[in-house]
Image: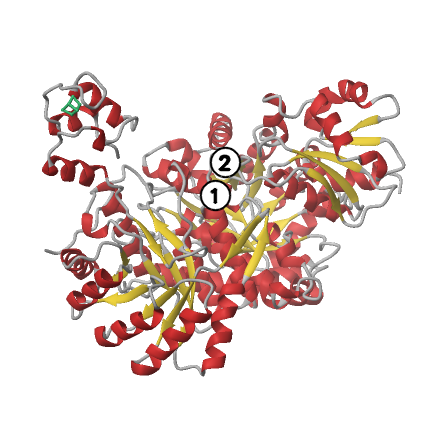
Amino acid sequence: MGLTGLDIFKQLPKTNCGDCGVPTCLAFAMKLAQKQASLDQCPHVTEDAKAALEGASAPPIKLVTIGDGERKLEIGNETVLFRHEETFHHPAGIAVLVEGSLGEEELAARVAAVGEASFERVGQTLQLDAVALQGEGDAFVKAAQVAAEKSAVPLILMNEDPTVMGKALEACGGKKPLICAATTENVEAMAALAKAHACPLVVKGSDLSSLAEVSEKAQAAGATDLVLDSGAREPSQVLANETAIRRAALRKRFRPFGFPTITFAQADDAQDELQQAASYLAKYAGIVVLRQMEPWELLALVTVRQNIYTDPQKPIQIEEGLYEIGSPNEKSPVLVTTNFSLTYFTVEGDVEASRVPAWAVVVDTEGTSVLTAWAAEKFTAEIIAEKVRAFDVASKVEHRKLILPGHVAVLSGKLEEELGQEWQVIVGPRESSGIPSFLRTSWPS
Amino acid sequence: MPFETPVEKWASAVNTVTIGATSAEGGTRASTVTVGGDTSLPFLQFEGKTPHRPVIAMEVLDVPPEEWPPPMAEAVGDVSDDPAAWARKAVDEFGADLISLRLVGAHPDQQDRSAEGCAQTVTSVLSAVNVPLIIWGCGQADKDNEIMPRCSEVAAGENCLLGTAAQDNYKTITAACMADGHKLLAEAPLDINIQKQVNILVSEMGLDLSRIIMYQATGGLGYGMEYAYSIMERTRLAALAADRMLSMPLLALVGSECWKAKEARSPEEVVPEWGAESERGVAWEATTATCFLHAGTHILVMWHPRAAALVRKTIDSLMSQEA
Ligand code: SF4
């Protein structure tokens, strides 16, 4: 979405004074376009030109930060409609609704539970991102104070009364909660609070037109970091609105919609809620708010998010090393594979299915599959032999047999040479799906 | 000023394909299943039409898995070693739109069941239920070339969906499909170019493109789901952009992929932090299916009746006109 050198040149003084360190304004513009220079290196640029250039080069969807400290949530700055076009950049936040009417102890426990929920998957720690606190009047203010004190994750303060919100913000003491929400009725007052407390603000419409209006008013009143709520709660309408917002921001650079969004999964049953939330994660939500937090629900949801936000150009990798599948012993087979997570998990699953426990020598191939890694010389006889030594495979097993993926059978001679004469390399099946029958028939147990 | 949603003007639509044949059409099915025809990205009602809702095929195996996670064993119950009874239960109790029969028992490493035995299974399932059938071989190319022609023959006229034709093994099954009036499942391993190639190969044999459904390999949630998701999304975009070789409806295997995952299988004693076993596998399967709906899948092949019910509800809500 960058400007061309010529677009930038039009805004420069065109005096060719050279103070920027480049002989001409045009040359400087070209450098700017390539992001090799920054505008403040030209001391003569006018304020108007600066504003125009900054506006035009701003990302189509603003990056919005919620909360402060280690667990702050950053959402937005998305650049594409489909993950294969580039990648989705900032994983959506998952928030859990907490009732402000709960007793102090229960409230503190619930808030703590949201912060503590954590899952390990393929070397990543997957967590929840925010507590969405809901309530009325003084009880809400009090709850906000308790939650702000006890919560490891940022807060979303849900109350539409500006007076109550003002007190709640005071009670939170500068932790930059997300104010939720500004509507047609209260937008000026809410935007003023957002400005005064330097907090992000949800703008809520009853449809897309009213959302655009509230967004413009909030910005006019000085709120800079917005999160959009189209008001839709039915899945088909949420999908339509989320798509419209993302398209308008990216394709039309429609400024009122140049922000991340917030969605609410509404079902009473956790399974139904999970399906809604998964839908919203797939299609453009910046934040998904849940009512429940069943462990299996959260596990599925953080995994959906991990999958959807994986960079298609950077496959998920696992750490290299010697892995145990089942409980292998000194007689168990040793298989070699790569550290592309999908490759490894497929092998792991198929070894488990064979019910023959095994060792897996996982070689760092920068997350590429067996054939790709071999073609790129990241999975050579030398590298494999080096890893077999580095992971001290010989100390784990009595035998000296190594099972090589069938696709790289060509490596077997060289690999035996590299490993030394006591080792024997066995060519395994080409596809992982052949592992169960291979292990059952060709591995003496 | 009222906001106007940016609408894409697509050049084309996904093919419309019907599976199954009633007696008027030369088969014995009570009803048929039609998928495809979409003129927009999935479920975008402001942009185009989804004339046929995505459907759920329940999978039936000729030989039950050796080790089923308890929630699956419980759901299928004592019919798991009787494909006909299992299929009947899937239709009557689980609400299957179609039955997806997989002849795993034919695999040489399994029971190495004969072509005749497989054909008998097909016949018994056809007579047990009156919904359309998807029939898969065992995945071993040579064996499938042996059993599928016979299975196709005994189902002649029923307009089944037969799988699969792959880049290096497509001739036998394509010929059987053409001879017996079936639809063809064309398979490619998460690769759009190979998928196109398979479609070209089978069409060069004389099979009309309108008789193909594509299966591009599936990864379950957490195990490559995003690859399948993006391949399907790209395929839908290609179909809407009028790429004739990628305009066929899509099928995804959800049940078998998901129930392989340790997140679905592990007993609660082993992973108490993952919560109730009775819910976890169902959640895993349903969530994968939901993601695939957004990527553009037309036929979801599922295992657990509760997961299927959840997905049916999701389809209802996404197709809802109230919006
Ligand atoms: S300092 Fe500014 S005005 Fe001078 S040459 Fe560089 S860009 Fe042009």
Residue flagged by tag 1: what amino acid is it? Thr
**Which residue carries the number 2 mark?**
A314
Front position in the image: A299 or B110: A299
Labels 1 and 2 share a subunit:
yes
Q: Is residue A194 left or right of residue B2?
A: right
Residue flagged by tag 2: what amino acid is it? Lys
**Which residue carries the number 1 mark?**
A310
Front position in the image: B251 or A314: A314
Q: Quadrant of ligand 1?
A: top left
Using the image, name the chain to which the residue with label 2 belongs. Answer: A
Q: In this view, does B130 lie to the left or right of B312?
A: right
User: Which residue is at a point 18% across and 22% down the rendered structure image?
Assistant: A19
Tell me, yes or no, if residue B94 can be seen here. Answer: no
Q: Distance between the residues labelled 1 and 2?
A: 7 Å
User: Which residue is at a point 40% across and 53% down the rendered structure image?
Assistant: A92
Using the image, name the chain to which the residue with label 1 belongs. Answer: A
The answer as to whether callout 2 falls within 8 Å of ligand 1 is: no
- Circle 1 crowding by C-alpha within 10 Å: few under 14, some 14–19, many from 20: some
Work out whether A435 lies above or below A276. above
Q: Do tag 1 and tag 2 residues touch (Cβ < 8 Å)?
A: yes
Report x, y in % for residue A360. 74, 39
